Image (cartoon, coloured by chain):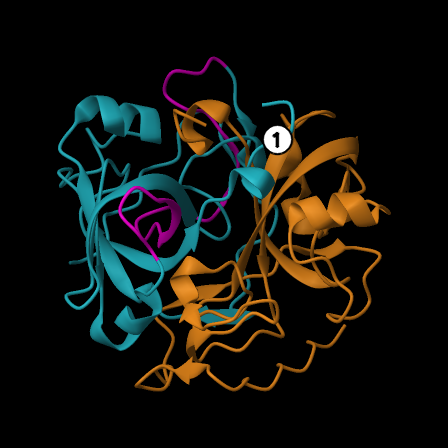
Chain colours: A cyan, B orange
Amino acid sequence: MSAPKPRPARPGEAFFSEPLPATDDAGLVFIGRLRSPFAEFDGCPKNRRAALEAGGGGSVEIDRPWREALAGLSVGDHVFCLSWLHGARRDLALQKPRHAETARGTFSLRSPARPNPIGLHLARIIALDPEAGILRLDAIDVVDGTPLLDIKPYFASVDRPAED
Amino acid sequence: MSAPKPRPARPGEAFFSEPLPATDDAGLVFIGRLRSPFAEFDGCPKNRRAALEAGGGGSVEIDRPWREALAGLSVGDHVFCLSWLHGARRDLALQKPRHAETARGTFSLRSPARPNPIGLHLARIIALDPEAGILRLDAIDVVDGTPLLDIKPYFASVDRPAED
C-alpha cells in the first residue's frame, strides 16, 4: 500500500525554520501493518474515541519474523500500538487543526504532522492468533495499511497520571 | 553522548528467526535529548513509578530548530515523551527480565530491547522555557542523554482505557 499524499499547509500554519536534516539519526523497520475500515485520511477518525464511535474495529498484522514476540499478550489486554504515519508532513512547527481558531505548536497537538510522525494508539485486544500474526482490536484511528513499529502493553501504574 | 553498550542476551532468551533487515523502512531525526540523574543503565529506574520514587526529576532539551513547536504546552500538563533507546538490543523475540522466572514475548514487555527501540514515557511538566527549549519534568525513566523523538500531549479521553 502506498503512502497517502501529504496534505497542503493551511493559512496560519508555520514551517520549521530549518528543513529536516538530509541524513537520518536512526532507522526503523516496519514489523507489520494496521488494518482499519478507513481507506482514506479524509473520514478517518482522528483519535481513539472517534474510532470507537465509528465502529468497525481494526486489527494488527505482524509479519512472520516478529510473531514469536507476541507470546504473553492476552485477549482483553490494552496495548499501545506505535505506527509510522507515512503520509504525514514533517515540516510544520505551528498547525491549525480544521476546527481550531488559531495555530498551535506541533508538540501540543496529536496531529500526525510532526518531525518524527510516530502514531500512538491505545487499543484493546479482542481476539488473538499469534501464529497468524493477527491481533483484532476494538478500534484504531489510522488509515488502512499504516505501517506498524511496535506493540507495548499498557500499564495503568505507569501510563496514567496519578490523579487521573 | 555515546550510546550505552547493549546488554548480553540471558539464558532462556530467544532471538528473532531472521536478522534485522539491512535497509531501513523509514528514518528518524533526533530533536533533542532527555536529561536524567541516571548516568548508567544499571541503576536507572525501569518505569515512571520507579523514577518518581528515585526522585531527582529530569528534563527535555529541544534543539533550536524545533523549539517553536512547543507553543501551547503549559506547566502542569502531562505529556508523552518518545525516546530512541540507543543502547538497546533489537534482536530479542523472547526476554527474561531479571526478576522473572520465565521468558516472555518482547511485545508483552516494556523492556527497551525491541525491533524498534522507541521508549514511551509519561511525565508532568513542572517548568517550561520554550525559548531555551527546556521542559523540566517530574521524573523520567531513561539514561541521561537519551535522544528525543517526539512530545505528545496526554489526553485522558483517548490515552486511558474506559474502565480504568
Q: Nearer the viewer, residue B74 or A14?
A: B74
| Dot 1 amino acid type | Pro
The residue closer to the viewer here, A36 or B31, is A36
Q: Alpha-carbon neighbours of circle 1 within 10 Å: few (<14), some, or many (≥20)?
A: some
Side of B53 where A24 appears, left or right: left
Residue B46 screen position, x and y as percent: 66, 58
Disc tally is 1
Q: Residue furthest front?
A: B101
Secondary structure character of the magenta stretch overall: loop
What residue is shown with label 1? Answer: A161
Would residue B119 be visible to someone looking at this image?
yes
Give above or below for A54 relative to B2: above
Q: Secondary structure at mark 1?
A: loop
Give the image location of residue B144, x and y in percent. Answer: 77, 62
Q: Position of residue A135 (x, y in %)?
A: 22, 53
Quarter of the figure that contains the C terminus of chain A: top right
Tell me the residue at 44%/23% (across/down).
B157
Residue B55 appears left or right of B23: right
For residue B113, above or below residue B118: below
- Circle 1 chain: A
Q: Which residues are magenta?
A: A73-101
The location of residue A161, given as percent across then percent down, is: 61, 30
Q: Quadrant of residue B124?
A: top right
